[in-house]
Image (spheres, rainbow, N blue to C red):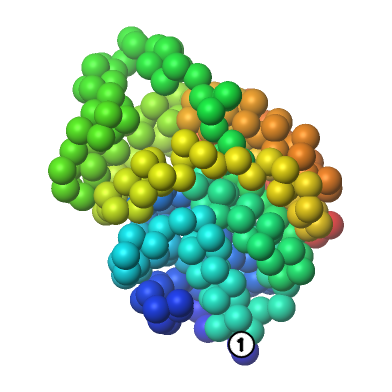
Amino acid sequence: MELQKGEHEAVLNGVRIHFTIRGQGPPLIAISGGPGMDARLWDDFGGIDDFVTIIAIHPRGSGLSGDAPDDAYSLRDYAEDVDALRRHLDLERPLIAGWSHGGMIAQQFAISFPDDLSRLILMDTSAFFSDFLNDVEASVEAFRGQPWYAKSLEALRKEWAGDYETDEDLAALWADEMKFYFARFDHRARAYHERTKDLPVRIGPLKVFNDAEAPVMDMRRSLENVRAPTLILVGRHDFITNVAMAEEMDRHLPNSQLVVFEESGHFPLVEEREKFYQIIRNFVSG
């Protein structure tokens, strides 16, 4: 099937899934973060659609896709949607890229469907949490002098405590706390924040992850069976999916390389755009 650029929808595994196709070159399915975040947080993908055809999936229950029945928001559910999209588009072995929670989905896909991808890109994500997540408030202390610090810290505390009732409540908290996800909230970060801060955020998938999956998630042993060459990217100043988490994935993946972005937090495609572009290009070209 020839990939038609633009906005598309398909019913996959009983859920209405929205996806965007853009760019040129080998197909790359891009899985966004969250859970519950909008896939448009990828923004312009750091320009890598110069050399790959991006298929950006809005995960079930997120962005422009429909809700899943019975709160079916496990990593396996998401990975099966990626495989269903791959088959829907008649893609034999696409590249798979996942960012943050999307990187967890990408790992699950590579574990569940090891013969159905050519290469794997994991950006600012983790296979495991409990031993590596630092004191969140201490991690953002470097921003204390910023005029927005107090408001953003309060938003972070409320989000982590589950102190919100509606999707709109959560989206407002995210718009404030996301400033901490950069190494520096400079002109690039501010421009990106302005472009994306009003995107919708949905509670349902996040609640399932926080309550049921995150406390027990551990894919490390399963990563040893992943055969696809894997690129692991992480920002040095990412407080939520940190360098220790990336190093742990690198230890368990049999064919991986780890690149640390020294001037980035959770957004290397924004903060170190040129390096991000070149690293991905080199990896895709083999």
Residue farthest along the bottom direction in this orientation: 1
Residue 166 visible in the picture:
yes
Quadrant placement of the C terminus: bottom right
36 lies left or right of 283:
left
Q: Against 113, is 42 above or below?
A: above
Which one is in front, 98 or 221? 221
Q: Position of residue 247 (x, y in %)?
A: 71, 31
The quarter of the displayed image where residue 70 is located: bottom left
In the image: residue 199, left or right of residue 60: left
The picture places residue 263, in percent across and down from the top left corner, at: 58, 26
Above/below status of 142 relative to 8:
above
Residue on which disc 1 sits: 2
* Figure quadrant of residue 268: top right
Q: Is residue 283 visible?
A: no
Q: Residue at x 61, y 55 (%)?
A: 108
Crowd around label 1: few <14 · some 14–19 · many ≥20 (10 Å): few
Q: Position of residue 96 (x, y in %)?
A: 64, 61
Q: Secondary structure at mark 1?
A: loop
Query: Mark 1 is on which residue type?
Result: Glu
Residue ID at (21%, 50%): 167
Q: In this rendering, is residue 60 above or below 41?
A: below
Instruction: Give the left or right position of residue 235, taking residue 215 as reference.
Output: right
Place residue 67 in its image quadrant.
Answer: bottom left
Q: Position of residue 188 (x, y in %)?
A: 44, 36
Q: Residue at x 62, y 89 (%)?
A: 1
- The residue drawn where x is 76% and y is 69% is 115
